[in-house]
Image (cartoon, rainbow, N blue to C red):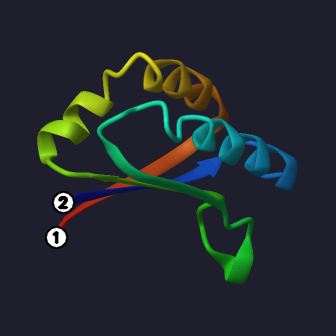
Amino acid sequence: MVKHIVMFRLKERTEANACDMRDVFLAMKGKINYMVNLSAGVDFLKEGRSFDVVLECTFNTREDLENYQTHPVHIPVKEYVKPRVECSHAVDYEF
C-alpha cells in the first residue's frame, strides 16, 4: 500500500479558506474507486506549523497513485488548489 500525504500552505491563511480547501478534498472521497482511503484536515496555524491543510490518500499500489494524478475527479481539484496555495510538500510512504 502507498500513503500519499500533501501539506499545503495557503496564500491567504484564514480558517475559512483552509476549511473550504479541506471540503474540496473530502468531496473526492468515494469517487475514485481504487482509492482505499482519503482524509483531509485543517491544521490552521497550530503550534506555529507552516502548513494549513493536510491531505492523506491511501492506495493499493504506486500505479493507483499515479493514475489518481490524472483522474477526472482529481483534475478539477488540482485546478482549484493551484491559485490558492503558496507552497506545498508531498511525501509518499509504502507499507
The residue under the point 31% across, 30% down is: 69
Q: CA distance from mark 1 to mark 2?
A: 5 Å
Which residue has dot 2 on it? 1
- In primary-sequence order, the first of circles 1 and 2 is 2
State which quarter of the image contains the C terminus.
Answer: bottom left
Q: Name the residue nearer the viewer: 11 or 72.
A: 72
Q: Name the residue nearer the viewer: 75 or 48.
A: 75
**Marks 1,2: beta carbons within 8 A:** yes
Q: Position of residue 93 (x, y in %)?
A: 22, 65
Q: Secondary structure at mark 1?
A: loop
Q: Secondary structure at mark 2?
A: loop
Q: Amino acid at mark 1?
A: Phe
State which quarter of the image contains the N terminus.
Answer: bottom left
Q: Position of residue 24 (x, y in %)?
A: 65, 36
- In the image, is 32 to the left or to the right of 93? right
Quarter of image, res 4: bottom left
Which residue has dot 1 on it? 95
